[in-house]
Image (spheres, rainbow, N blue to C red):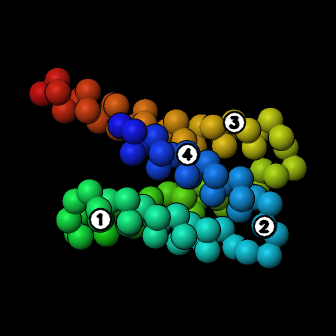
Amino acid sequence: VVMGLLHLLILLTFAKLQDSAENSSAWQWALGFAGVTLLFVFFDGDLMAAAITAAFWGLYSWAYFALLRQLVDSLVLWLIVYIGGVVLPWLLLAKLLLSASAQ
C-alpha cells in the first residue's frame, strides 16, 4: 500500500511539473512516468509484470497529462481532474476487487 501511495504521489508530482514545463509534450512526461513505474514494479516482481504495468500507467498518464494541459485555463476543472485522476485508479481497483470477491 505504501508503494502504491508513493507511486501516486509521484504521478501528482509529474502532473504538476509537466504543467509548468511549456516546451515539452505530455507524452514525454508519460514516458518518464512509465520508466519510474517500470523500476517500481521490476524491483518488486518479474519483468513481464513490470512491462505490462509500465505500459498501462504510461498510457494512463499520457491521457491524464494531456487532459490537464487542455484544462489549464480553468482552475476549478484542473483541480478536479488533478485529484480525480489519482483517485480514479484506486476506485477502479476497489470495484474490481469487490466484484472478484463476490463471485
Query: In front: mark 3 or mark 4?
Result: 4
Q: Are the residues at dot 1 and dot 2 in contact (C-beta closer than 8 Å)?
A: no
Q: Nearer the viewer, mark 2 or mark 4?
A: 4
What's the distance in space between the residues labelled 2 and 4, CA to CA?
Answer: 19 Å
Measuring 61% from the left and 68% from the top, which residue is drawn there? 29
* Residue named by callout 2: 21
Q: Specify whether 57 is left or right of 94.
A: right
Which badge, 3 or 4, is on the more N-terminal residue? Answer: 4
Amino acid bearing label 1: Phe
Residue at 78 percent of width and 67 percent of height: 21
* Earlier sequence position, callout 4 versus callout 1: 4
Please tell me which residue is depicted at 64% across the width and 52% down the height of the picture. Answer: 13
Task: Identify the residue under disc 3.
Answer: 80
Query: Mark 2 near mark 3, Cβ–Cβ under 8 Å?
Result: no
Q: Earlier in the sequence, mark 2 or mark 4?
A: 4
Task: Name the amino acid type tagged 4.
Answer: Leu
Camera-nearest residue between 77 and 5: 5
Residue 102, quarter of picture:
top left
Dot 2 lies on which element?
Answer: loop
Give residue 15's position: percent from left, percent from top.
Answer: 66, 54
Q: Amino acid at mark 3?
A: Ile
User: N-terminal of the two: label 2 or label 3?
Assistant: 2
Q: Which residue is mark 4?
A: 9
Whole-number angstrom distance, CA of label 4 to CA of label 1: 19 Å
Q: Are marks 3 and 4 in contact (CB under 8 Å)?
A: no
Q: Which residue is mark 1?
A: 42
